[in-house]
Image: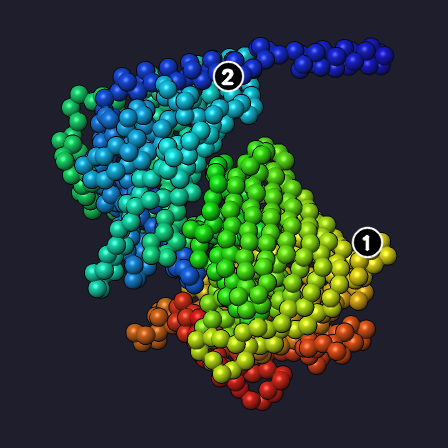
Amino acid sequence: MLNNFICNKKAIFILVTILYFLPNSPAFSQTNLDSLIHKVQIKSQNSYDSIDSVLFSGHTKSYVYFSYGPFDLKLVPYMEEYYFDGYWIKPDSIRMVIKAQRIVAPDSVNVNIGKDTFPIHNPFHYLFDPSLIGFKDSTNEKLWPFYPFALGADSLYYYEKINEIGFGDNKVVTVSVAPKDNDIPAVHGTYQLDVNKNEVVGSDVLFNEATSFVRSSVNRRKDGFSLSVSGSENHKMKTKKALLYGNYWLPTNLEEEFDIRIMGISVKINRIIEFESYIVNPTSPDSTIIKNKKIIYLPDSTLEKKLFADVEYPSKLSREEQEQLIKKIEDKFSAENLFTELIESESIAKQAFRIGLEQKFGTYFRFAQDLGKYVAYNRVEGLRLNYGIDVTNPVLKNSVLSIIGGYGFKDQEWKAGASFLQYLDKKKKIFLEGNLYRAITFEENKKLITTGKNSFTSLLYKGDYRDYYYKTGSNFGIGFHATDNLAFKISAVSQNEDNATIHTRFSIFKYKEKFRSNPGIIEGRLNGIRSVLLYRLYNFDFDLSGEFSNSKYLHSDFSYGFLKSNLQKKFRPTYHSNLNLFLSGAYSSGELPPQKWFDFGGKTFINYYGNLRGVNYKAFTGDKMIASTLEYSINGSALYSLGMKLGIIKALKLTLWNGLGWSSLSAKNKRFAEELNIPTETTTGIYHELGIGISDRLNIFRIDLIRNTISKNIVQVSLNVLR
């Protein structure tokens, strides 16, 4: 019996294997794909041609998130929710009636979303006629993307099969689309095609940079200031569709996000639209809807009370809504920042991140991109001018090449570099990175302060927060971008490291004072291995990095190893309060050269280095260290609600914190400082500080009262601006 079972089991296994490898339908070749795409185009075009107008209704929530540059001051998100009836007339004219609305906005700024600001898509949200690209309606110019499955789209798009799902009558093919010319409004992304019905059944796309439909207005309630701007970028859209008319799949759920910039204000919009009903080619549409006015507000108070009956705070976002929105939006910011920290070349990082979003770019001259990219100022080089060129897909697909050159007018040194990044897989998770360089460098974390901000503070008041040395050499690494917020990279590095000295004393303020000294280094050839792990979420940051060099096995002038880590966790105890935990630590072995020592303590421009307030910048150093800060802040609105009825208190924030720190420097490493200009101060035991701060809500101006183990019984009073 057992033998029969084994034989039957083998037979079943063989049968399943044969069935698995025998296709249920012919292999899906490029010819088959071209034929399928053409059939889908014919069906889609026929459905579109038979539609003259559509009545529809729906519900939308639009979230707006502000990040005020250049200081990245964040405001409470804005949200508008409304129910609407709409009427679309070919070729692309939309009229809408807003019948119920809920608005949540910060006290000082109102962004009007409904009045032509971010218009609702037409039911197709694409153009089917190439002559309508840039079509002007009664109010503004729309640059909708051209539909990849309209007739004639073959001349504008590339198509590539990604995978097949199902078999027989239920086969769906996922197709990647990309425009041949990025000057034409188009999309990048994927579509799901039903092979047997020749229909589109789903999509996940990103609008290219030539697509624009945003009109944004900002006004301040008190002084009446207003501004309008058009244009959108990083426009991504997901749709779920249902077969509602003939062979055409009209959207039922649509989620999109995009960015706009207004006078240095970065604004990210996230919108969810639910289309609840459609009537195609109505015989007698509502006369209210077909009026010439594009948007008509006819709020029904009875309907609003019914629709928003379960909303606890109609005039503001609930704590859960805020958390959900901030998590969604700031996780996106964190994903982009993660790439900038992971990749050595900032320009490569930006271009590679955009390739990961399925955007394609040609030659891009950095001179026009950002002032901070081609002008820098520091105490070693003085004024440095850079010029570079970035090329996407120079030889291989999904690759970026960057070449940059620069000159420091005070150190009179030329700098140059070439960087290359190549994705190795279709999902763009694994990549190779290589760099050749002759440059000035530093060990401080890029999160401490950006090059643009450091140049600004150096020029303004000698606030140069980096310690520099020259490097000449190369590195090569492989990285794994596991998720949007998690990445790992390991690299081999070979470079000469040389001293850098101060060559300028100019600043606008504090002209007679000297710049902070630039510490000396141990010069030599570094051959080593580096690794970094980054995890970035809106309420949790973690990074772990290490470096190893050995004179015997790697023929390096140095022999050491180190690990260092940073962790930041944010909590939200109540609607009006925040609790932040900061931890950092580092450990080394061998003879660690001074340029690799670990520093902590003190304040920088718009940031705290080590998040300690009671000591100077880089107060402590060492080859081992640990530091921690626990910070609790509460908005004045909470105190006002508890009975402190002072008008000004709503504009204030109260902060309490407790900080600890410890560092040590071994005797063998301390001897490096005997002939060099290197700070060697470590903590005496454990450093401890306790403080209270009072500031405005945005933390621009703040007064701190601090007591620590250095000043003992003396309470320090510190006035901080832009911390």
| Left or right, 643 with reference to 594 | left
Q: Position of residue 22 (x, y in %)?
A: 65, 11
Among the 4 quarters of the image, the one containing residue 585: bottom right
In whole angstroms, how far apart are the C-alphas of marks 1 and 2? Answer: 52 Å
Count how many numbered circles sit on residues in the image. Answer: 2
Q: Amino acid at mark 1?
A: Leu
- Say above or below: 235 vs 625: above
Q: Name the disc covering residue 90, or none.
A: none
How packed mark 1 is, by other alpha carbons closer than 10 Å (few <14, some 14-19, many 20 or more), is some
Determine whether the residue tagged by mark 1 lies in a helix, strand or loop: loop
Instruction: Determine if residue 630 is in view.
Output: no
Q: Position of residue 579 (x, y in %)?
A: 52, 65
Q: Name the disc covering residue 33, or none.
A: 2
Who is closer to the viewer here, 625 or 81? 625
Who is closer to the viewer here, 294 or 643? 294
Among the 4 quarters of the image, the one containing residue 283: top left
Q: Amino acid at mark 2?
A: Leu
- Say above or below: 579 vs 461: above
Instruction: Determine if residue 716 is in view.
Output: yes
Mark 1 or mark 2: which comes first in sequence?
Answer: 2
- Say above or below: 216 vs 647: above
Q: Name the disc covering residue 554, or none.
A: 1
Residue drawn at x 25%, y 54% is: 227
Among the 4 quarters of the image, the one containing residue 468: bottom right
| Left or right, 79 with reference to 283 | right
